[in-house]
Amino acid sequence: MAIVERPSPPALQLPAGPQVAPRPLGAFTRPSATTGWKSWLTTIDHKRIGIMYGASALFFFIIGGIEALLIRLQLTSPQGKLYSADLYNQLFTMHGVTMIFLVVMPLGAAFMNYLMPLQIGARDVAFPRLNAFSFWVFLFGGIFLNTSWFLGGGADGGWFAYAPNTGVTFSPGHGMDFYALGLQITGIASLVGSINLIVTVLNLRAPGMTLLKMPVFTWMGFVTQMLLVFAIPVISVALFLLTFDRLFGANFFNPAAGADPLLWEHLFWIFGHPEVYILILPAFGIVSEIIPVFSRKPIFGYPFMVASGIAIGFMGWGVWAHHMFASGIGPMSVAAFSLSTMFIAVPTGVKILNWMATMWGGRLRFTTPMLFAIGLVTMFTIGGLSGVTHAVAPADTQQTDTYYIVAHFHYVIFGGALFAFMGGFYFWWPKVFGYVLDDRWGKWHFWLQLIGFNLTFGPMHILGLQGMPRRQFTYLPGYGFEFWNRVATVGAFIIALSVLVFLINVAKSTRAHLANPVPVGPDPWDARSLEWMLPSPTPAHNFDTVPTVTHLDEFWHRKYQEDETGRVTRARPTDEVAQKGDAADVHLPSPSYWPIVMAAGLPLIAYGLIFNLGIAAVGGAIVLLGGFAWGLEPADDPERAHSHAAHGDGHGEGDGDGDGAGEGDGAGDGQESPEEPAAVSAGEGEGAEGDDS
Amino acid sequence: MSDAVLTETEATGAAPAHTTSTGISNEKLAMWVFLGSDCLLFGALISTYLLLRHRSTTPPFDPAEVFDIPFTSVSSFVLLMSSLTMALAVGAIHRGDVRRCRTWLLTTALLGATFISGQVYEFSGFKNEGLGYTTNIFGSAFYTLTGFHGAHVSVGILFLMSLFVMSLRGKLDASKAETVEIFGLYWHFVDIVWILIFTIVYLIP
């Protein structure tokens, strides 16, 4: 619901009486900088937040990648002695935690934050300040998690942290405390973000944008957020129980007190299996955008693509115990979860077939993004097939905790998600930054990554079937493990080289653009969805005029039409269809200090719980006071509140009504006070548009 | 910017202002989604409690030994009454009756605080009878489950007091009716969760 400003000449409104300073309870004014580094700290623009998600994820990707290389160095040859078993445990645990929670999830968040509002024709997300809060909480949580390296050592219980192995008895250092509290913090980020994006998709669609006209990426993002919103509280409970056990001496995972070790496994995997779809569905969405564009065909079977995504979202809740076939859950459970696991391969297979059918008969252009998309289709299929072998419980019993599992989940997460995200970088880079990444370097990047990836993880299938257990810090000679381990290590360094090529590509393309800026135009790929209607880079206010949507692939339908013979012809040149991005009368919400301030309190609470309750009290006070300041801050800087002040409708000017939108997770935070993601003060009233209250 | 844009302008110009695609405001929808999420939080906690409550290896073995059901029934009644007063507060603000709304908000907060005080009193009694947080696995599960609920009530009281102060400062009028209503959703949810917890933890042996 936008605040739609009725046309009123600016000359009439400003002198009209004293400025109604929207500073309820004498609270602070809002920051107003829109350039410079400070503006990034206070920004609430979903596009900038998306960019920061992406940059932070790449930073953590390098950290997690270095950890992976260190693991491979140890395993290059038998009886490697580079690190102790203890340090090795920390390395593989932190590698897994970093890659899953601090790389793949935030990469998904980066694309979803940037693209979902654009693809549904919105000016921002439903709660821009909460969006900034999510990002800072994620970033601080990730940094908190990684500071454990300097404060006594990283987590050492594996990424799924089976209790009681992760209790104080077997993991006496602080590593697991950092794990439990750090993931709790990033979980808050995901939960808040998911509520925000769900409301955005449901409420802020442009006129005519029905649910079944939304691009597949937005649909997959929406399913992802639905999974998050219900999966996060379960892992939160598990992490709380572990924290209480470790810090306060509770007995949840103490077998001597009668605990059942299966409790953690169930809680973790009820979260953990939806989590793997949380990792992969945004990637599926990205590929579903890239393949039609470079096949010059609409996506094949759009309703099936959407329905299979939804089906995965539901069925993802009924397969968690296939992670536990070897834990003695009983033959009935094993049989039931075997069946459900085989069934969930069906909607995934539907997607694979639809991508192939989209390419079939299309005029393919093998650009870098397209190569990465095809990379996902092929590599994910291999990972999916090895996944089906896990559904066969007797086989799985043999494979449990071997390198076969490691091979499988790297094929789906690296071969699936990461290939798609890399493709997404190349695809949307011009939209985000206004210039394309070099295609030749991009192709080097792709082929090196593909070869390195297969050399690293392909051999692990063989190692696993030969019986090499995962997570052991070394192995003896004479079991036939030597050769393939060496190959895997070489492969890992080729992957590292491919990442280096990517970074060089970014640097070179940026330099070339700065030296000789060539406007890339709104639509460099002849694409289909609404974001390509906007100038590149996207202007801060997104749409000059919110489009009225009549078709799936709306932008494409504005460019092309069928003639009488059914042949598709160009109807209008892109420049005519695209927006100019020059609307001067769009009112954007002001930036805010409080998201970052509140977020900064959370890691302090966590440090305090581990080391000194005094620090926790300071952190709690920051969160509490930050929350109230947030609730009380004016919706706008008075100086900038042009038409609003005159408008004088005390409606929607966020003076901090504590409606407590969400966050039962602690101190009285998150009084989401209304703020309008860009109301338009132009004559045309926009329809469904983001504001609130 | 040609025909297409012009027709667009016409179409959007006709669209009513202040609407969302669903017709539900962003805040209210967000609260519903959050409450859905919170269901899973309590679902996981209640499941944990049910799994662990009879597994203690040290006394007290039977949860029924420590409970004082008449006392807890009274405090449960108090909490349920706070839902009534909350509903009255929402009704009052919808009618624009700020003064009465303020009274009911304060009453709701007091009833909530009474419940919390009852819980503190009850728990210190359990502690004296030898059931601490670390005593046995039942103790850990019981205090964690009821503690999370108590934390939800406490956060609710904090919000109630914020609304109360807002109303004293004249910041809460009929235009904020939905804010009160959305908070009411949260409050009723917390009460419903207590009905579940009271039944499962105290009444079912």
Image (tube, grey):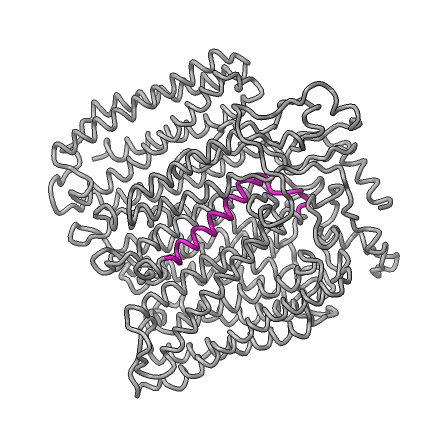
Is residue A405 visible to the viewer in this orientation of the structure? yes
B23 and A478: which is toward the camera: A478
Q: Is residue B70 above or below residue A94?
A: above
Q: Nearer the viewer, residue B117 or A136?
A: A136
Could you tell me residue A19's position as x and y percent? 67, 23
Q: Quadrant of residue A283?
A: bottom right
SS majority, magenta: helix
Residue A307 in view here: no
Q: Is A302 positioned to the left or the right of A473 in the image?
A: right
Location of residue A484 in the rendering, given as x and y in whole percent from the top left corner: 41, 83
Q: Does B139 appear above or below A655? A: below
> Is residue A8 placed above or below A339 in the rendered structure?
above
On-image quarter of the N terminus of chain A: top right
Q: Position of residue B79 (x, y in %)?
A: 33, 23
B47 relative to A203 in the view: left or right: left
Question: Does the segment drawn in magenta span residue A253?
Answer: no
| Occupied quadrant, residue B132 | top left
Q: Quadrant of the rendered structure where residue A663 is?
A: top left
Front residue of this view, candidates B68 and A527: A527
Q: Which residues are magenta?
A: A119-147
Find residue A159 and report its horizontal and vertical position in percent. Answer: 37, 61
Residue B54 falls left or right of residue A154: left
Indicate left or right for A683 with A529 as reference: right
